[in-house]
Image: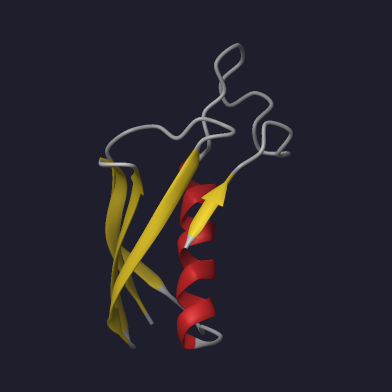
């Protein structure tokens, strides 16, 4: 699943003034959207492991790669060959 967070996203003002970056929680929200699109609605979740390796800037395209099956999925968020974030989601 590909996504772009537009420069006018409401989470960006103040995160960080003069050089906005997409907040991690917005990236994780897109990861959960990708899992739900493939596997249906999710109940309560845990994220036992999440690592943010590089920032995502507004307007940049990123791809989400999800592996695994319920109740545990691994994910990677990449921009081209660059790893932006990775981790695990558990239902």
Quadrant showing the C terminus: bottom left
Please identify the quarter of the rendering in which residue 69 is found: bottom left
Q: Residue at x 30, y 75 (%)?
A: 73
Q: Residue at x 53, y 59 (%)?
A: 29
Is 58 located above or below residue 31 in the figure? above
State the image coordinates of residue 57 (x, y, percent, origin top left). Answer: 50, 30
Is 53 located above or below residue 21 in the figure? below
Horizontal side, residue 62 vs residue 26: left or right: left
Please identify the quarter of the rendering in which residue 53 is found: top left
State the image coordinates of residue 19 (x, y, percent, origin top left). Answer: 55, 16
Q: Residue at x 57, y 23 (%)?
A: 20
Number of dots carrying numbers: 0
Q: Residue at x 51, y 83 (%)?
A: 42
Q: Residue furthest front?
A: 80
Horizontal side, residue 32 vs residue 86: left or right: right
State the image coordinates of residue 7 (x, y, percent, origin top left). Answer: 67, 31
Q: Residue furthest top?
A: 18
State the image coordinates of residue 28 (x, y, percent, origin top left). Answer: 46, 56
Q: Nearer the viewer, residue 60 or 46?
A: 60
Q: How is the image coloured?
A: secondary structure
**Residue 50 visible, this angle:** no
**Residue 86 visible, this angle:** yes
């Amino acid at each position: 699943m590909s996504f772009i967070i537009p420069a006018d996203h409401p989470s960006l003002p103040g995160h960080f003034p003069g050089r906005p970056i997409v907040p991690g929680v917005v990236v994780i929200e897109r990861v959960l959207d990708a899992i739900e699109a493939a596997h249906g609605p999710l109940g309560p979740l845990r994220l036992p492991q999440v690592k943010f390796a590089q920032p995502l800037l507004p307007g940049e395209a990123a791809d989400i790669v999800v592996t695994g099956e319920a109740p545990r999925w691994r994910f990677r968020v990449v921009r081209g060959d660059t790893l932006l974030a990775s981790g695990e989601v558990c239902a």
